Amino acid sequence: MKANIMYAAGDVRVEELPLPELKLPTDAIIKVVAACICGSDLHPYHSMHAHEHGEGDAMGHEVIGRIQEMGSEVSGFKQGDLVIVPFAVGDNTCPFCQEGLMTSCVHGSFMTGCQAEYVRVPQAQGSMFKLPDEIKDDSSLLPSLLTLSDVYGTGYHAAVMGRVNENTTVTVIGDGAVGLLAVLSAKKLGAKQIILMGRHKARTDLGIEFGATDVVPERGEEGVARVRALTNGEGTHVVLECVGLMPAYEMSIGAVRAGGVISRVGVPQYEEAPVGFSSLFGRNITLTGGPAPTRAYMEELLPDILDGTLEPGRVFDVTVDLDGVPEGYRAMDNREALKVLIRP
């Protein structure tokens, strides 16, 4: 089968690999119907060092596929079912999963190798989410359904953890797919003002369609000043940080209102950050967020997609086959694409 492997920064190759096999009775094998490139895939694309023995990493963690084979401990599904797999898999029965935190499942892991023709799904029983039988492989809903695997669920997690409601003002930092779907999520939860910090007009225009009331293209102190000018000098009740870089965290501190919440879902590319008196403590700021347990949100978010109320799949602006994935990485890295959809 074809699969995309990253060997070093900027080096993604399409290769022929053996078909995946069941390793545990809790596994399933699915044939990939739709996958994509994630903004977080660009972190190793920028910084990955070549492995000593020339081995690469199988890429991709977002996928919709049809079940080909299941282990003996997987029930409630049948061969041919169309399923979404969350980027973080888990048994859905451990104490953490029961609390809606599959990303901390005691038997959990993160999906890999989804930019391929077939993929093995660990903990398939608890992870796979069956889609209605009437959804076909060529359905126009597939891009939006695929966002439930990661980016829409992640944007929604940011808003939920930030306690967004009809009484809150919100700043979203980042105009990538997660940031734009954090805007969509804040709007869904009723936020009365949503300020999107981004400077790529095609993206911020989509953000306005998703519900942003204001756009702030400036960064750093100038950007913070603009946010405060839009909020009576106070800042917003909630900041959804969807980038993961230190400058974004620093802007969060500046943009958040006293007593407010910073909710981070951008994968942090740092270990140390200000949390002391002058940054968070003195103003009673709550810091929350983390990797999204997207499986926990699928039932809640699915109906709006099925009935056409919301179309989170609009974040996909380029579609490639498996041979086009290396070019897809280049296009996303150069900001020529917002998010790349893969149709094997």
Image: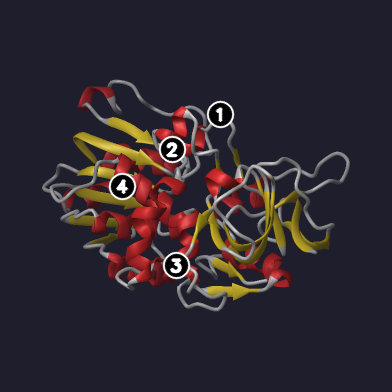
* Relative side of 150 to 167, left or right: right
Task: Compare residues 122 and 322 and report the one nearer the observer.
Answer: 122
Pick whichever of labels 3 and 2 is earlier in the sequence. Answer: 3
Pick whichever of labels 1 and 3 is earlier in the sequence. Answer: 1
* Relative side of 81 to 117, left or right: left
Q: Amino acid at mark 1?
A: Val
Task: Compare residues 222 and 281 and report the one nearer the observer.
Answer: 281
Q: Position of residue 127 (x, y in %)?
A: 54, 47
**Marks 3 and 2, how far apart at CA:** 22 Å
Closer mark to the observer between disc 2 and disc 1: 1
Closer mark to the observer between disc 4 and disc 1: 1
Please name the residue that numbered disc 3 is placed on: 144
Pick whichever of labels 4 and 1 is earlier in the sequence. Answer: 1
Labels 4 & 1 near each other (Cβ < 8 A): no
Closer mark to the observer between disc 4 and disc 3: 3
Q: Secondary structure at mark 3?
A: helix
**Marks 2 and 1, how far apart at CA:** 17 Å
Q: Secondary structure at mark 2?
A: loop
